[in-house]
Amino acid sequence: MCQNNYNRKKEEKKYQHLNYVEKTQIERWYNIEKKPCSEIAKLL
């Protein structure tokens, strides 16, 4: 597996440990700028 692939997988895993409350808090913080949820998901 190449390094780039490995790094991408680590990035995806980074936020999987967050529970629902933490995810909604993050969405609220990002939504101060009134972004749609799909854009927030890309930022995470």
Image (spheres, rainbow, N blue to C red):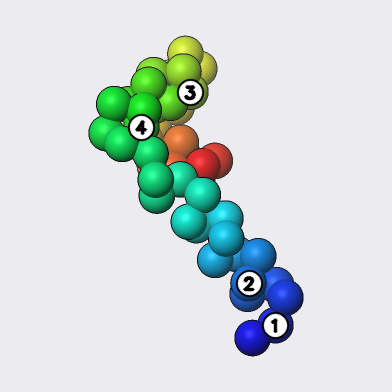
Judge by depth and name the residue closer to the eye, 32 or 10. 10
- Residue 23: give x, y in percent of width and height: 36, 32
In the rendered image, residue 37, in percent from the top left (x then y), is placed at 36, 35
Residue shown at 70% from the left, 82% from the top: 2
Residue at the extreme top? 32
Looking at the rendered image, the quarter that the N terminus falls into is bottom right
CA separation, marks 2 and 4?
Answer: 24 Å
Q: Check if mark 2's residue and mark 1's residue have beta carbons within 8 Å.
A: yes
Q: Residue 33: image x %, image y %?
A: 50, 17
In primary-sequence order, the first of circles 2 and 4 is: 2
Disc 2 element: helix
Badge 4 crowding class, 10 Å Cα cut-off, few under 14, some 14 to 19, many 20 or more, is some
Q: Residue at x 65, y 65 (%)?
A: 7
Q: Is residue 41 above or below residue 20?
A: below
Q: Mark 4 or mark 1, which has the lower sequence index? A: 1
The percent position of residue 28, horizontal first and vertical second, equals 39, 19
Residue 39 lies, with reference to residue 9, above or below; the image says: above
Label 4 – label 1 distance at C-alpha: 30 Å
Residue at image coords 37%, 21% = 25
Compute the Cα span from label 2 to label 1: 6 Å
- In the figure, residue 21 lies in which quadrant? top left
What amino acid is at disc 3?
A: Tyr
Measure the alpha-carbon separation of dots 1 and 3: 32 Å
Return the residue at label 1.
2
In the visual, does 34 lie left or right of 2?
Answer: left
Give amino acid for label 4. Lys
- Earlier along the polypeptide chain: callout 3 or callout 4? 4
Which residue carries the number 2 mark? Answer: 6
Kind of residue at disc 2: Tyr
Identify the residue position indicated by label 4 in the image: 23
10 Å crowding of disc 3: few (<14), some (14-19), many (20+): some
Q: Which residue is mark 3?
A: 30
